Amino acid sequence: MMSSCLLLRSICNHKKFRHARFLSTIREPRESMPFDVLIVGGGPAGLAASIRLKQLCAEHEKDLSVCVIDKGSEIGAHILSGNVFDPKAMHELFPEKANLGDDHWTKSLLAQQDSYATPVEHDEFLILSETSSYCIPNVLLPAELHNNGNYILSLSQLCRWLASQAEELGVEIYPGFAAAEVLYSDDGAVRGIATRDVGLGKDGEKKSTFERGMELHARQTFFAEGARGSCTESLIEKFELRKGKQPQTYGIGIKEVWEIPEEKSQPGFVQHTIGWPLQSGLMDKIFGGSFLYHQNPNLVSIGVVVGLDYANPYLNPYQEFQRWKTHPSIRKHLEGGTCISYGARVLNEGGYHSIPKLTFPGGALLGCAAGFLNAVKIKGSHTAIKSGMLAAETAFDALKEGEAVADSGELSSDDNAIELLEYENAVEKSWIHDELYQVRNCHEAFARWGTGGGMIYTGFAAHLSKGREPWTLEHSGKDADKTQPKENFQPISYPSPDGILTFDLLSNLQRAGTYHADDQPSHLRVKSDLADVPESLSLQIYAAPEQRFCPAGVYEYVDNEKGDKKELVINAQNCIHCKCCSIKAPHEFINWTVPEGGGGPQYQVM
């Protein structure tokens, strides 16, 4: 994988090099590079798409140039997931690596990344009270929560392995490049992306290190940025991709990885919980739960997911996570161990009803950018990989007869942008649709009827109706609008951290390895038309919930110079790119844009 500096030199010397026709606010031309297919995002969906495209090229003896860019400093640096991995799509992508033996993909992952994919050996689902627990018999659980045949692994490490497989096939992969804007041709079709300028000071002026961003043009551009990607959101708005769809709803997942004594390790153990501390009764409407997974050789991945449609502005997801670790059923797995990594990321929870239109002229949405996560199954990597494969197959069929950039070194002026309508049809005919359709009403059941009602409905859908119920439970409104005024609640008092099992936020943040150059424009900005919202509405009406929902301590209110009122301070250097602020801030007053490429967390085992 090539660094940003090497990519700059590569582009300047490449036969495809062209002066770009697009200009940004800095009135200097940007250099450009064309591809047949450009993929924004080096996660499971984007990498699977690149691999499948090159597989088809080899099968049909047709060369297409395929490029993957990612804003992380390396592939996997911004990837975070639980992760109990369903290998169904992986086996479809690599059928030659599906049979157990020396050629199995898990053996290759271990050899190349020194990372285990641990087969699940035992499932446990607990309902927690503050001091005790009740284990639900597995026979009563939905089939989606049975993990036989699945693997406990690090998704960030798996993505590094997928990247190595892609590069072996001829995919060009460039980490450290952040897609800052979508580029359009004269007819309004997507024509690629521009990366962010680097070397700008906080005041927006050029520094001595200034370098203009690049333009990457393509016949097809796939957006695989994950949940709430900035380019994806702009495309959804421009092309009205959510028209006729229900709004997306999200959760914030907060995770730690612990290294424990080998004698306490239970490789293959999977535990999920609901109840304390998030839910105190059957009618409680906070959607969320926890996970705890034992991975070879002696790692434990733990985390809490909190639905961002919660009402109480005083709720602090990070503190709820720390409190959860003190439960006897959780503490015993961690005692004597050391926390080695921390991070957070939002995930889509709206399911089938919230999937937008997937295509537009010149491109498509893949994986969690589209919202293919199965919230009941607590998995989305397998659907992400499958969506990437389907997009690749559709794109190959559409592009194979035209003049390839791989052959000519440039985009043909006669090559009009194509909309891959067949991709959406392919998804609807696939097992992605079948999975998500069966549980399409479950999240809304929790929102309407609380934990008890949601569990009953999920059991009904999983065991009886199998998605055949003739009704739709519709949800409306954004997660930001579900927050209620502070006057309806009392502040929550959380216990102080002990520094052994529980940690203060800023100490834990160091384990994410997040870094942004201090002297650059903030990538977190208050929207200009909502400039008065932080101090006059968020602070006064909602007790400034951004101080509590952010899992990186980015937002705080301090006295102004006169000392007569509070004002918002944004510590953008702390950001771990979870995207929560763009979703849950009152009136969605934060505009999340990309920082300089390579900034952000440096996840290794997430």
Image (cartoon, helix red, strand yellow):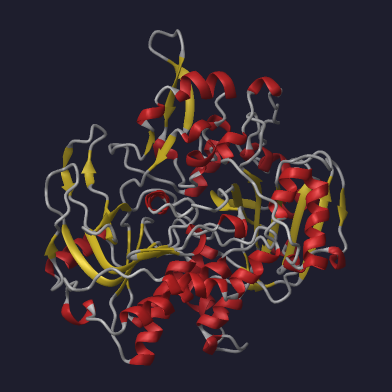
Please provide percent x and percent y for residue 181: 30, 51
Quadrant position of residue 300: bottom right
- Residue at the spot 62% in from the left edge and 32% down from the top edge: 483
Asked whether 128 or 499 is in front, the reply is 128
- Residue at the spot 26% in from the left edge and 59% down from the top edge: 4
- Residue at the spot 72% in from the left edge and 55% down from the top edge: 442
Please provide percent x and percent y for residue 333: 74, 55
Asked whether 448 or 528 is in front, the reply is 448
Quadrant location of the N terminus? bottom left
Asked whether 496 or 104 is in front, the reply is 104
Side of 534 relative to 259 (left or right): left
Please provide percent x and percent y for residue 509: 51, 42
Q: Is residue 83 above or below residue 247?
A: below
Q: Is residue 571 above or below residue 363?
A: above
Please provide percent x and percent y for residue 449: 78, 44
Side of 421 relative to 61 (left or right): right
**Residue 161 at least partly seen:** no
Side of 172 relative to 165 (left or right): left
